[in-house]
Amino acid sequence: MIDVISETIPIDERERTGIERAAQAALDFEGREGDLTILIDTPERIQTLNRDFRNVDRVTDVLTFPAWEGEISLSADGYLGDIMICYARAKEQAEEYGHSLERELSFLAVHGVLHLLGYDHMTEPDERAMRKRQTAILDSIGVTR
C-alpha cells in the first residue's frame, strides 16, 4: 500500500494519483513489494526535519526515512518507510527545469522509493546508476521531460 498524505498542502487528485503511480512503478521496476507513506509538506517542516535528522539546516526537495536498520530488508510488517516531499520546492524545480509539476512530483516519488530500497547518490557512479534507474522508471509510465 502506498499512502499519500497531504494534510497541510492541498494537492489535487491528478497529483496524488501521479505520485502513487510513480512510487508503484519504482517498486515494480525493482521487483519489490512493501508499504510506504509519502507525506507532502511545507518548506518549514522539511527544513526542520532535514536539520534534525541530517544536520543540514536548509529546505530540500525530498527526505526519506527507511524502516530498515543496518541491512536493507523489509521491516517485519513489510513497511519500507516514509518519504517527505516539499511541495513548494517541487513547484520551483518544475519551473526551473521546464517541465510539469506532475513530472517533478513523480520524479521525487521515484527518487524517494529508490532511497528506501537502499540506493544513494553519494558517489558519481552511484549517482549515474540511480539517475539511469529513475529515467527508466519514469519512461516506463510515460512521464518524460
Image (cartoon, rainbow, N blue to C red):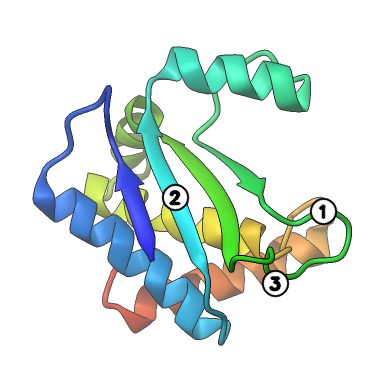
Name the disc covering residue 37, or none: 2
Q: Amino acid at mark 1?
A: Glu
Q: CA distance from mark 1 to mark 2?
A: 17 Å
- Answer left or right for 138 relative to 52: left
The answer to which of marks 1 and 2 sits earlier in the sequence is 2
Q: Earlier in the sequence, mark 3 or mark 1?
A: 1
**Residue type at numbered disc 3:** Ala
Which mark sits nearer the N-terminus, 2 or 3? Answer: 2
Label 3 – label 1 distance at C-alpha: 23 Å
Q: Residue at x 74, y 55 (%)?
A: 121
Residue at (48, 57) in percent of width and height: 36
Spatial CA distance of label 2 from label 3 is 24 Å
Q: Nearer the viewer, mark 3 or mark 1?
A: 1
Given residues 35 and 99, the one toward you in this image is 35
The disc at residue 69 is: 1
Secondary structure of the residue carrying tag 2 is strand
- Residue 33 shows in this picture: yes
Q: Is residue 100 visible?
A: no
Please identify the quarter of the rendering in which residue 17 is found.
bottom left
SS state under label 3: helix
Image coordinates for residue 93, horizontal then vertical, percent: 38, 36
